[in-house]
């Protein structure tokens, strides 16, 4: 039986509110680790890249790629993780360029190219764990 995937829809206002709150909390935590709240604005901007950008990577998978893939769970899982990885690399580039522009960071101080992909996979797995624990469709139960 082929599943009929429902397109994901959410008002932009709700997306901005959720991803903005995630960026504020994540930016606060990151700035404390980076050495103080004076780095909070920069940390919040960089976390927002992953929260907001990661949302659109996920929407791209859900509404663009997933309906075109075979319904086999292994194909869906592998493709989703691959999309997260590639999307995370693109987001990581945006983060690096933002940090370069906002702080004067030199190009030879950039992290490895693949770290953004690994970071987005980790972010998405945690986000889907929260959905799973709330009984909502998620990566883990195959309904989301």
Image (spheres, helix red, strand yellow):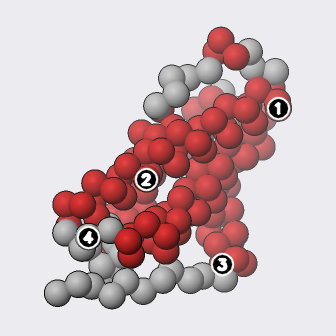
C-alpha gap between disc 2 and disc 1? 28 Å
User: Dot 4: what SS?
Assistant: loop
* Mark 3 or 2, nearer chain start: 3
Which residue has dot 2 on it? 83
| Of marks 3 and 4, the one in the foreground | 4
Between the residue at mark 4 and the residue at mark 1, the CA separation in whole angstroms equals 43 Å
Residue 109 position in % (x across, y down): 64, 15
Of pointers 4 and 2, the one earlier in the residue sequence:
4
Callout 2: SS: helix
Q: Are marks 3 and 1 in contact (CB under 8 Å)?
A: no
- The disc, 3 or 4, on the residue closer to the chain's N-terminal end is 3
Quadrant for residue 12, please give it. bottom right
- Residue identifier under label 1: 102
The residue identified by callout 3 is 14
The crowding category of the residue bearing disc 1, from other C-alpha atoms within 10 Å (few below 14, some 14 to 19, many at least 20), is few
- Residue at x-position 35% and y-position 52%: 81
* First in residue order: circle 4 vs circle 1: 4
Q: Residues within 10 Å of mark 4 (few under 14, many from 20)?
A: few
Label 2 neighbour load within 10 Å: few <14, some 14-19, many 20+ = many
Expressed as whole percent of the image width and height from the top left, the position of residue 75 reads 24, 61
Q: Quadrant of the N terminus?
A: bottom left
Q: CA distance from mark 4 to mark 2?
A: 16 Å
Q: Earlier in the sequence, mark 3 or mark 1?
A: 3
| Image mark for residue 70 | 4
Above or below for 128 versus 105: below
**Which badge, 2 or 1, comes first in the chain's sequence?**
2
Disc 2 or disc 1, which is closer to the eye?
A: 2
Are dots 3 and 2 in contact, CB under 8 Å?
Answer: no
- Report the Cα–Cα distance between label 3 and label 1: 28 Å
Q: Nearer the viewer, mark 3 or mark 2?
A: 2
């Amino acid at each position: 039986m082929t599943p009929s995937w429902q397109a994901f829809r959410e008002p932009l206002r709700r997306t901005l509110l959720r991803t903005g709150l995630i960026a504020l909390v994540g930016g606060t935590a990151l700035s404390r680790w980076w050495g103080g709240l004076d780095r909070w604005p920069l940390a919040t901007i960089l976390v927002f890249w992953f929260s907001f950008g990661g949302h659109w990577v996920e929407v791209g998978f859900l509404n663009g790629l997933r309906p075109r893939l075979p319904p086999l769970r292994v194909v869906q899982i592998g493709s989703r993780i691959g999309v997260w990885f590639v999307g995370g690399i693109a987001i990581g580039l945006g983060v690096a360029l933002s940090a370069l522009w906002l702080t004067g960071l030199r190009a030879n101080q950039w992290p490895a190219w693949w770290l953004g992909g690994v970071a987005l996979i980790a972010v998405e797995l945690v986000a889907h764990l929260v959905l799973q624990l709330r009984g909502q469709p998620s990566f883990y139960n195959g309904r989301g």
